[in-house]
């Protein structure tokens, strides 16, 4: 079991404002490098609050990571449930004394299968790039910082580009 708390600072022009989220994961390692997991997440910001249920399969081989996540998003005030698929490819490695530091980078697509608005179209709605550092305070406690750049595709206008500093605290039980 793993708990995660994250604070995301958003630019002023982003109507969401700052975002606070908490996740609780249940995960199981299987074959070499294969992990299946499920989570519940609560996310709150200035625009809307939501609860997410997530299932994912991830695979790690050497420095390389791959993940596919399926999300069911319950957004307060929405017309219906939103469904999203999020494939990710990444690279990470540990370094330093006792290998307590980890550097990572990834790219992720957000493919919306069903939008919360009945009239909205789905498809690839965003992609993200992420780069960051994590420090292992204990075997079950990590502190991380990263920079997240997200491009939201807007069919009726100019794409939106977000620059999001992220701080995380991860506790594995």
Image (cartoon, helix red, strand yellow):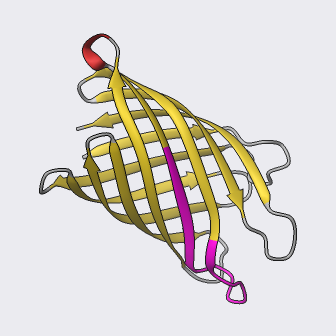
Q: Position of residue 127 (x, y in %)?
A: 61, 59
Q: Nearer the viewer, residue 91 or 135?
A: 91
Q: Is residue 62 left or right of residue 149?
A: left
Q: Nearer the viewer, residue 75 or 103?
A: 103
Quarter that holds the C terminus: top left
Is residue 112 on the magenta stretch?
Answer: yes
User: Residue sitting at 35 percent across and 31 percent down?
Assistant: 93
Q: Which residues are magenta?
A: 106-124
Image quadrant where residue 146 sits: top right
Q: Position of residue 4 (x, y in %)?
A: 41, 41
User: Residue sitting at 87 percent across and 70 percent down?
Assistant: 157
Is residue 60 on the magenta stretch?
Answer: no
Q: Nearer the viewer, residue 82 or 160?
A: 160
Q: Position of residue 10 (x, y in %)?
A: 72, 42
User: Outermost residue toward the top?
Assistant: 97
Q: Nearer the viewer, residue 94 or 41?
A: 94
Image quadrant where residue 143 sits: top left
User: Residue sitting at 30 percent across and 57 percent down?
Assistant: 58
Q: Is residue 85 left or right of residue 128?
A: left
Q: Position of residue 156 (x, y in %)?
A: 85, 76
**Labels in figure, total:** 0
User: Outermost residue toward the left?
Assistant: 31
């Amino acid at each position: 079991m793993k708990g995660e708390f994250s604070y995301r600072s958003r630019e002023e022009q982003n109507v969401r404002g700052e975002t606070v989220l908490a996740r609780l994961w249940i995960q199981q390692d299987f074959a070499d490098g294969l992990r299946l997991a499920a989570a519940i997440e609560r996310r709150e910001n200035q625009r809307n609050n939501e609860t997410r249920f997530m299932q994912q399969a991830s695979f790690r081989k050497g420095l390389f990571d791959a993940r596919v996540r399926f999300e069911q998003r319950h957004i307060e005030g929405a017309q219906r449930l939103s469904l999203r698929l999020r494939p990710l490819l990444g690279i990470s490695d540990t370094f330093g004394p006792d290998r307590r530091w980890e550097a990572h980078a990834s790219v992720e697509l957000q493919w919306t299968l069903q939008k919360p608005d009945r009239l909205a179209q789905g498809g690839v709605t965003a992609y993200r790039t992420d780069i960051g550092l994590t420090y292992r305070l204990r075997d079950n406690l990590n502190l991380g910082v990263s920079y997240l750049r997200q491009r939201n595709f807007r069919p009726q206008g100019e794409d939106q580009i977000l620059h999001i500093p992220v701080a995380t605290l991860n506790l594995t039980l």
